[in-house]
Amino acid sequence: MNQGADAYLTGKAPELNRFAEPHAYSNWWANNGSILGFMGLTISESEQEIINDATTAEEAWTKLKDRHSQEGPVKQVQLIQDALAIRYSASEKLATTSSKLTNLNKRIWAMGAPSPELFLCILMINSMSSYPELRYTRESVAQSLATSDGPDVDPVTEPSKKRFDSTDIKRALDTAQGLIDSDHLQPIDVVLAATPNNSCPRPPIQCDNKTCPKPLGHTSTYCIAPGGGMAGKTIGESKAARARDRATASGRKPGNTGSSGVHHIV
């Protein structure tokens, strides 16, 4: 957009008096309408809803800036990922690609410069994206960060606000690591390989807790991830609880293997 049009967005080209300068006033509204129309063609449908009631280009531009500045760190992560995924190629005009990068860059920085702690959170969330086992952890962390008041809240001076920072993310990753390590002790492939060909293996047990990063091998009752039946417990405590429940269900005392039923001939 040229410099003259920018003045309509920033308010440097104010609306003129219709009685003192009727021709200039008419031209101003014509230019304003053209800029509004151009904006409507270049933004998304969700953004169009935001500026539907705007009568001037300046008002529409202000609403768009306010909207993007309030989207938060999770949206900032998405925009950074989008920007880093863009490549110049023969399938698109180089100027078009440059324009996309320019627009994404403006949107990223319109949200404000991240603090070191917030930027660390962004890096950690972004680094989970290529690890399938961390999909649920990433979604849970992103949701928690989005619904919090950010990582820079001082709990002493702002006790009513909810802080979420890299320490919380590390805690979630520790839980995920424990579940991953636990599942690696009994890989499903090994179990299936040991199953006789003429038998039908039972389907693997799967946890239905949406925040569980490694749902295979246990149910939500024994899940130690947030939202699970044993949230906050250790893997050892979860295994012990499962062993007790299995023993109770089979009528045995915990720790008692019972009689093997095999008679030895002397």
Image: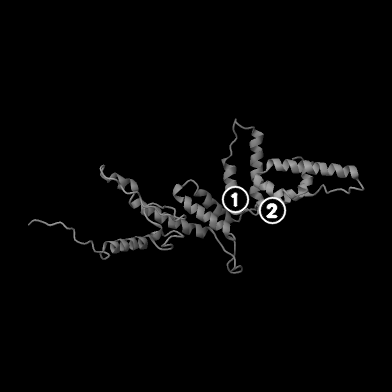
As measured in the structure, the alpha-carbon distance from the residue carrying label 1 to the one carrying label 2 is 14 Å
Q: Is residue 117 visible?
A: no
Residue 226 horizontal side relative to residue 45, left or right: left
Instruction: Please tell me whether residue 89 is drawn above or below residue 234 in the rendered image.
Output: above
Q: Is residue 169 left or right of residue 1?
A: left
Which three-letter amino acid code belongs to the residue tagged 2? Asp
The answer to which quarter of the image holds residue 259 is bottom left
Callout 1 amino acid = Lys
Q: Position of residue 106 (x, y in %)?
A: 67, 46
Query: In the orientation shown, which residue stands out farthest toward the top?
Result: 90
Residue 111 placed where, x, y %?
Answer: 65, 52
Q: Residue at x 59, y 32 (%)?
A: 89
Q: Residue at x 86, y 43 (%)?
A: 26
SS for dot 2: helix
Residue 21 falls left or right of residue 176: right
Image quarter hosting the C terminus: bottom left
Residue where numbered disc 2 is placed: 66
Report the residue at 29% width, 44% height from top.
193
Find the residue positioned furthest to the right.
20
Q: Is residue 122 left or right of residue 57?
A: left
Q: Position of residue 93 (x, y in %)?
A: 64, 32
Quadrant in which the N terminus appears: top right
Nearer the N terminus, badge 1 or badge 2? 2
Q: Is residue 18 shown above or below 248?
A: above
Tag on residue 195?
A: none
Q: Secondary structure at mark 1?
A: helix
Q: Which mark is residue 75?
A: 1
Q: Are marks 1 and 2 in contact (CB under 8 Å)?
A: no
At label 1, counting other C-alpha atoms closer than 10 Å, the crowd grade (few under 14, some 14-19, many 20 or more) is some
Count of residue discs: 2
Q: Is residue 142 visible?
A: yes
Foreground pick, 84 / 176: 176
